[in-house]
Image: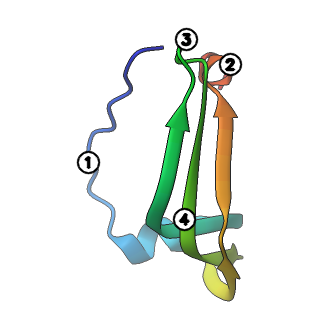
């Protein structure tokens, strides 16, 4: 997978967060990496908030997000 593009929608930030049952909102990108074959990538941030039942709750420090790009084809 070389690129992925996300189009903007009509939902507000609060509506998007309100629709999340369990998740993590990450901001302040600190680092990122992608392998030579573009199959795996990882992002590291400085700050995040846990989302529980549509509300941002606990603060999380130094969260990371990593994925195998081939998983996007299965969603």
SS at circle 3:
loop
Q: Position of residue 2 (x, y in %)?
A: 40, 15
Mark nearer the N terminus (2 vs 1): 1
Determine which of the numbered discs, if any, sits on residue 48 in the image: none
Q: Which residue bears the numbered disc 4?
A: 45
Mark nearer the N terminus (2 vs 3): 3
Mark nearer the N terminus (4 vs 2): 4
Q: In this picture, is 52 found above or below 74?
A: below
Q: Position of residue 20 (x, y in %)?
A: 62, 65
Determine which of the numbered discs, if any, sits on residue 37 in the image: 3
Viewer-nearest of discs 1 and 4: 4
Say if mark 3 contacts mark 4, CB within 8 Å. Answer: no
What is the C-alpha distance between the residues marked 3 and 4? 23 Å
**Residue at horizontal 32 percent and vertical 31 percent from the top:** 5
Mark nearer the N terminus (1 vs 4): 1
Tell me if mark 1 has few (under 14), some (14-19) or many (20+) residues whose alpha carbon lies within 10 angstroms of its own.
Answer: few
Q: Which residue bears the numbered disc 1?
A: 8
Tell me if mark 3 has few (under 14), some (14-19) or many (20+) residues whose alpha carbon lies within 10 angstroms of its own.
Answer: few
Viewer-nearest of discs 4 and 2: 4
**Residue at horizontal 42 percent and vertical 77 percent from the top:** 14
SS at circle 4:
strand
SS at circle 2:
helix
Say if mark 1 contacts mark 4, CB within 8 Å. Answer: no
Q: In this picture, is 56 found above or below 12?
A: below
**Residue at horizontal 37 percent and vertical 22 percent from the top:** 3
Q: Indicate left or right for 17 with 22 as reference.
A: left
Viewer-nearest of discs 2 and 3: 3
Q: Write down the quadrant of residue 15 in the picture.
A: bottom left
Say if mark 2 contacts mark 1, CB within 8 Å. Answer: no
Q: Where is residue 73 in the image (x, y as percent from the top left)?
A: 61, 16
Q: Which residue bears the numbered disc 2?
A: 74
């Amino acid at each position: 997978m070389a690129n992925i593009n996300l189009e903007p929608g009509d939902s507000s930030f609060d509506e998007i967060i309100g629709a999340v049952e369990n998740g993590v909102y990450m901001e302040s990108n600190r680092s990122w990496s992608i392998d030579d074959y573009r199959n795996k990538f990882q992002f590291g941030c400085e700050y995040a908030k846990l989302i529980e039942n549509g509300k941002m709750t606990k603060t999380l420090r130094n969260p990371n997000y990593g994925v195998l790009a081939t998983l996007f084809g299965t969603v």
